[in-house]
């Protein structure tokens, strides 16, 4: 698959998912601590999100790195915009900026109750 075709595939995935995480592993089976951290981060908000495993797809990882100028995984897109990872999103959540972004991405959807893990 050419780099242009991979870029188009990524653009399609980003356009069709309000919150999209490119990481190592899946939502059900994360394969690195940073991907797990990102999954747990978004579970707390309660909005739907998807995870795309790019661990075994070096061409896609390379195109993503070029598109985002962000060399590491995970890479998070919200509402079509690239935000980095939880190092960026954590402070945004703390200062309320992320809540405002999520409200724009999910208009008319009441803020979900936070997810509480008891284990």
Image: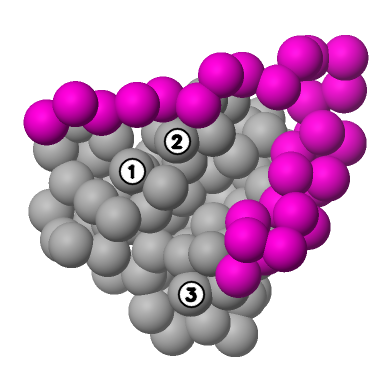
Q: Which of the two discs, 2 and 3, labels the residue nearer the N terminus?
A: 2
> 19 and 111: which one is in front?
111
Q: Quadrant of the C terminus?
A: top left
CB under 8 Å between discs 1 and 2: yes
Residue at horizontal 62 percent and vertical 32 percent from the top: 17
The span shown in magenta is: 91-119
Give residue 65's position: percent from left, percent from top. Answer: 50, 78
The residues tagged by marks 2 and 3 sit, at their Cα atoms, a distance apart of 16 Å
> 100 and 107: which one is in front?
100
- How dense is the environment of label 2, judged by Cα within 10 Å: few (below 14), some, or many (20 and up)? some
- Using the rendered view, name the quadrant where residue 56 is placed: bottom left
Query: Which mark is drawn over residue 61?
Result: none
* Left or right of 6 in this view: 1: left
Query: Which mark is drawn over residue 40?
Result: 1
Position of residue 50 relative to residue 113, above or below, is below
Query: Which mark is drawn over residue 87?
Result: 3
Give residue 108's position: percent from left, percent from top. Answer: 88, 14
For the question of whether residue 65 can be seen, the reply is no
Dot 2 corresponds to which residue? 44
């Amino acid at each position: 698959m050419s780099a242009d075709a991979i870029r188009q595939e990524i653009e399609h995935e980003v356009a069709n998912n309000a919150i999209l995480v490119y990481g190592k592993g899946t939502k059900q089976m994360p394969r690195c601590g940073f991907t797990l951290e990102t999954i747990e981060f978004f579970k707390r908000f309660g909005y739907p999100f998807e995870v795309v495993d790019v661990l075994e797809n070096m061409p896609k990882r390379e195109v993503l790195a070029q598109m985002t100028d962000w060399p590491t995984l995970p890479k998070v897109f919200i509402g079509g915009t690239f935000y980095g990872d939880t190092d960026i999103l954590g402070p945004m959540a703390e200062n309320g900026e992320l809540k405002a972004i999520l409200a724009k991405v999910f208009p008319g959807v009441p803020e979900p109750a936070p997810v509480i893990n008891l284990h």
